Image (cartoon, helix red, strand yellow):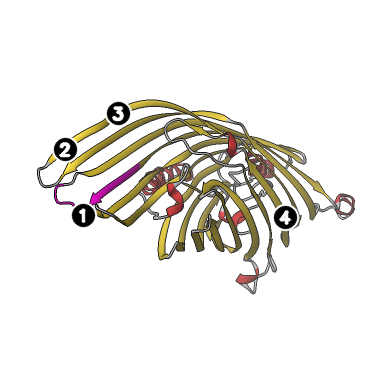
Amino acid sequence: MLKPLTKYLLICILITNVTGLALAQPKDNSPFSQFGLGEFIDSDMPSSHAMGGLGSVYHDFFEANLENPASLGYLQYTSLQLGFMVKRSNYTRVDDKQTIWNGNTNHFSLNIPIINPLNEALERRESEFSWATSFSLRPFTQVGYNVSIDDEIDSIGTVQSNFRGWGGIYNINWGNGFKYKNFAAGINLGLLRGQQVYESQTYFADLSNAYDDIFQSTIAYKGFQYRVGLIYEQPLDLNAARGEDDKPSKLLSAGFFVSGQSNFNTKSDVLKVAVNSLTSDVDTSVYVQDNPGTGIMPGAWGFGLMYRHAADFRVGIDYQANKWSLYENEARPYTMMDSWKIAAGGAWIPDANSITSYFKRVEYRAGFYTKMDPRVIDGTQVSESAFTFGAAFPFIVQRNVAWLQFGFDVGNRTGGDQLNDNFVRGNVGFIFNDNAWFIKSKYE
């Protein structure tokens, strides 16, 4: 029989390999990903995302909030978290309409309380200090598109242009969170790694002996990011709870995080050739390999408030902003604009202790967000708004609590006057908990 630690290590190795393979494959065909660094992947968990995206302040005993590392200070159970997304987009570009499905793994994390609350319970003591650490892998941006455009040009005829792109940048992250009394602080240290490929081909269908133009650019990214976070939780009924020898049930939390501006390095391969399919002649006009470059990844910050009433319900608001106007990239220059996001939402459990009804123990969530994306298309900044819904279903795995989380968004995104996306996005998350890590054994 495998020990719990061994089982988790085997699970992590398996999932890490599977996740790595999944993240490496292009699964999107979004015209939005042609611009800037590609599609930005939401970094919030299915739980907070279903509440609109309360990433600045969300915290829980059973799971980590990877957007604010201070949330690790509240973690009381080792949690293995894995999330997936699937999206159905109805794109409209000028007069062209297309429905596209795509999906991907959007996070994997292992989060461990170094100071285990079970030790305190076994020793009949209660500490005011807690500490947890986290290891995670998340996509940061993703490129995936395949666009064809046919033009009629006088004296040349039909000119067909094909544009393709694939690849992505990923965040490998180590976080630590500490809590003392009502105050929690944390820090995330992250490595950005990835590669993006951009390709264009131009064919002259009506010219008998024309050369087809082929251009390909491959960019590899390496960078470092850090984020610090704070959460303060104030009991509103502390005196009443003490009078009844109970814990406070009405809690107001304020959360804040800030990511520092950082530099990144690139290496680019550029190839431009002209190919004559009749004579098999290849004319290479540009060939550059391992061309070094640098760039600037701007900083971000967020602030949120959340009110929680014991295990009954919680509601909150959140605001996040990023100074993308400071973004620079020598390998692929692109002008971005400052971005922001406003979110609000809540969650409700009908009866967390219900014995007669399983669905009364389910947490139901809903929210809304609106945001401005940093990318600019046809002179207009990309905007997005959506309603979010979700639920968390508890179940028992080997005498430990686990959660199956579902969520979906219904929204709209626009890029200028000619590009529109009506989408439905689904999120699925798994949380496996175990409180048997770092247990102090005693022998009489």
Name the amino acid, label 4.
Gly
- Check contact, mark 2 vs mark 4: CB within 8 A: no
Residue furthest to the front? 155
Label 3: which secondary element:
strand
Residue pointed to by mark 4: 316
Residue furthest to the top? 292
Name the spot of residue 180 as percent of width and height, x first. Answer: 74, 36
Give the mark, 2 or 3, whose residue is nearer the N terminus.
2
Q: Which mark is residue 205?
A: 1
Q: Is residue 205 magenta?
A: yes
Of circles 2 and 4, the one toward us is 2
**Label 2: how many residues lie within 10 Å, few (<14), some (14-19) or many (20+)?**
few
The answer to whether residue 395 is visible is: no
Give the mark, 4 or 3, whose residue is nearer the N terminus.
3
Name the amino acid, label 1.
Ala
Q: Which residues are magenta?
A: 198-209
Label 1: which secondary element:
loop
Q: CA distance from mark 4 to mark 3?
A: 51 Å
Q: Nearer the viewer, residue 180 or 127?
A: 180
Of circles 4 and 1, the one toward us is 1
Residue at 72% from the left image edge and 55% from the top image edge: 316
Q: CA distance from mark 2 to mark 3?
A: 17 Å
Residue pointed to by mark 3: 288
Of circles 4 and 3, the one toward us is 3
Name the amino acid, label 3.
Val
Name the spot of residue 202 as percent of width and height, x first. Answer: 27, 48
- In the rendered view, would you say 61 is above or below 73? below
Residue pointed to by mark 2: 282
Instruction: Left or right? Give the position of 118 relative to 24.
Output: right
**Label 4: how many residues lie within 10 Å, few (<14), some (14-19) or many (20+)?**
many
- Check contact, mark 1 vs mark 3: CB within 8 A: no
